[in-house]
Image: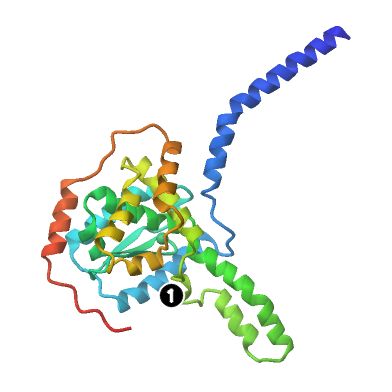
């Protein structure tokens, strides 16, 4: 009996030791859990399809900057960052466009179609700040925020449409199904992102910057500079990417969790050359009303 009890104690010690060893991994797993995209009724392949259709529309509607040097640089930087994105980054296309406007903004469509305004390149002080904006947009892509929101919206609509069917309102169910499918337009995808979604994109952006070797504070730093230096031009940026509460402090709190401080990259001669080029190119076309 004593022998059995002894063996049991020994086993308990082994189990406890194993549990303690597993603890850091468990904590790490919890950290990574934050990067799990929300509920989604679309597949990543459908994200790409939806993104491609909407990108084609946007290319017709928005003035794009067709300068090979600038566009190639933004694509290079964006693709370099995308490699460090958590979650299935290989499923997406990572195609970058530069919108020819001095408004400071950027947006992402599902599937990895990212549009960066010329004004954002001109306002960034160094490469890490531009990388921060791009990494934030890529965060929206890998977290699948566009199709996640569309999924939730269709969930809200369905019961209403079924009710409509019972009431005999012809076409309601059909049109609702069309909205649930691939038929939804750019507007629903570009819906104002909620603050929770912004906080998540900030988190992923910070993570990506760190792993790509950039100072992870650069993204939050750029948002701060925007607010102080360009209060007029950044209204649109912050209405598309609303400030989560304590945005800067939340990002600062994330950084120590990422790992030891590295010898960060902040700038490159290439970025400064591209910024000078943007500033010297002909002025953007006047914005269309509406
Ligand atoms: Zn955002």
Q: Residue pushed farthest right?
A: 1
- Asked if ligand 1 lies within 8 A of label 1, the reply is no
- Quarter holding residue 104: bottom left
How far from the left and from the top, in percent, is residue 78?
31, 54
| The furthest residue to the top | 2
Residue 164 screen position, x and y as percent = 68, 86
Q: How many marks?
A: 1
Above/below status of 237 relative to 270? below
- Seen in the image, is 61 located left or right of residue 171? left
Quadrant for ligand 1 reads bottom left
- Of 54 and 221, which appears nearest the observer? 221
User: In the displayed structure, would residue 287 be above or below residue 69?
Assistant: below
- What crowding class fits label 1: few (fewer than 14 Cα within 10 Å), some (14-19), or many (20 or more)? some
**In the image, what residue occupies the spot 48% across and 49% down?**
87
Of residues 143 and 34, which is closer to you in this image?
34
Q: Which residue is mark 1?
A: 186
Image coordinates of residue 254 in percent, x first then y, are 44, 43
Position of the N terminus, as image quadrant, is top right
**Residue at figure coordinates x 10%, y 64% from the top left:** 280
- Asked whether residue 270 is in view, the answer is yes
* Relative to 191, 122 lies left or right: left
| Helix, strand or loop status at disc 1 | helix
**Is residue 260 depicted above or below 123 in this figure?**
above
Question: Position of 289 compared to 66: left or right?
Answer: right
**Picture residue at 83% right of the left edge, 7% below the top:** 3
Q: Position of residue 33 (x, y in %)?
A: 56, 45
| Foreground pick, 137 / 92 | 137
- Where, quadrant-wise, is the C terminus in this rendering? bottom left
């Amino acid at each position: 009996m004593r022998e059995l009890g002894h063996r049991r104690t020994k086993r308990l010690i082994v189990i406890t030791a194993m549990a303690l060893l597993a603890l850091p991994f468990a904590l790490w797993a919890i950290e990574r859990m934050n990067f799990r995209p929300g509920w989604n009724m679309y597949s990543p392949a459908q994200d790409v399809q939806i993104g491609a259709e909407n990108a084609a529309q946007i290319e017709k509607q928005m003035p794009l900057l067709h300068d090979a040097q600038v566009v190639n640089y933004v694509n290079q930087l964006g693709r370099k960052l995308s490699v460090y994105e958590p979650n299935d980054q290989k499923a997406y296309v990572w195609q970058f466009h530069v919108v020819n406007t001095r408004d400071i903004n950027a947006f992402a469509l599902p599937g990895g179609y990212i549009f960066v305004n010329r004004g954002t390149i001109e306002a960034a002080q160094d490469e890490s700040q531009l990388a921060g904006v791009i990494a934030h947009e890529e965060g929206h892509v890998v977290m699948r925020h566009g199709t996640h929101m569309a999924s939730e919206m269709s969930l809200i609509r369905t019961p209403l449409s079924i009710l409509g069917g019972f009431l005999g309102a012809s076409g309601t169910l059909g049109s609702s199904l069309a909205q649930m499918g691939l038929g939804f337009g750019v507007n629903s995808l570009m819906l104002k992102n909620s603050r929770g979604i912004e906080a998540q994109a900030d988190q992923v952006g910070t993570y990506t910057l760190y792993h790509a070797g950039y100072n992870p504070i650069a993204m939050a730093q750029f948002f701060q500079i925007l607010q102080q230096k360009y209060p007029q031009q950044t209204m649109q940026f912050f209405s598309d990417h609303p400030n989560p509460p304590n945005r800067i402090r939340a990002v600062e709190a994330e950084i120590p969790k990422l790992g030891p401080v590295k010898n960060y990259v902040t700038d490159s001669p290439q970025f400064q050359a591209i910024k000078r080029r943007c500033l010297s190119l002909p002025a953007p076309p006047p914005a269309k009303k509406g």
